[in-house]
Image (cartoon, helix red, strand yellow):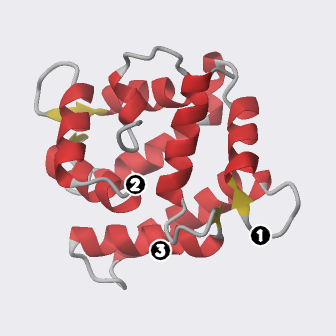
Amino acid sequence: MNELRKRKYERWFRAADVDGDGAITRQDVVLMSERYVRARGIGPDSPQAQQMYETMRRFWETVIAPVDTDKDDRVTSAEMTQAFAAMFADRAHYPEELAPVADHFFDLADSDGDGAISLIEFTHIFGSTGRAGDDECAEVFNALDLDGSGTLSRDEYHRAAAEFFYGENPDAPANHLFGRLH
């Protein structure tokens, strides 16, 4: 794995380690869900909130928990980086490895159901779950909006997710999908 991919995975990890204790736990996933629900201003018992909680529960069970090599219910940066490097070794496997998860996040972000993610929607999900500020979200969003439409299509979003997890181009805007790399 090259250094860029390692830095991207570490950035993703920092965003997912909501409480900052050096590990991703089920509680971090719950906290991400709660942040998103608050950012959207929806009731915690609403159908939209329940969808978010369910998607994040599945995300924990299918993506994060399986990489807990020592089975202590805490996924460290080393465990996650090693697993991501192995999981995301070949972009040709994106459709089965990552596209279903990306589709869930796209659908959650597309709160009005119009088939595109607006800047406000992008900021709600990535600002709240990825711990990025509004200015940072706007900068990343504008770079990912390849056709300049003012929204991210599902295709643009999938391109960004694939580039983030599989890509090695140091100039790709998608490197910053979960916040600026430093």
Circle 1 crowding by C-alpha within 10 Å: few under 14, some 14–19, many from 20: some
At 72% from the left and 33% from the top, the residue drawn is 87
What separation in Å lies between label 2 and label 3 (alpha carbons)? 11 Å
Reply above or below: 147 against 98. above
Q: Amino acid at mark 2?
A: Gly
Residue 128: x and y, percent? 33, 62
What separation in Å lies between label 1 and label 3 (alpha carbons)? 16 Å
Mark 3 highlights which residue? 31
Residue 71: x and y, percent? 86, 64
Reply above or below: 118 against 131. above
Q: Amino acid at mark 3?
A: Leu
Mark 1 highlights which residue? 73
Q: Amino acid at mark 1?
A: Asp
What separation in Å lies between label 1 and label 2 (alpha carbons)? 21 Å
In this view, the residue farthest toward the right is: 70
At 44% from the left and 69% from the top, the residue drawn is 33
Mark closer to the chain start, 2 or 3: 3
Q: Nearer the viewer, residue 10 or 99?
A: 10
Mark 2 highlights which residue? 130
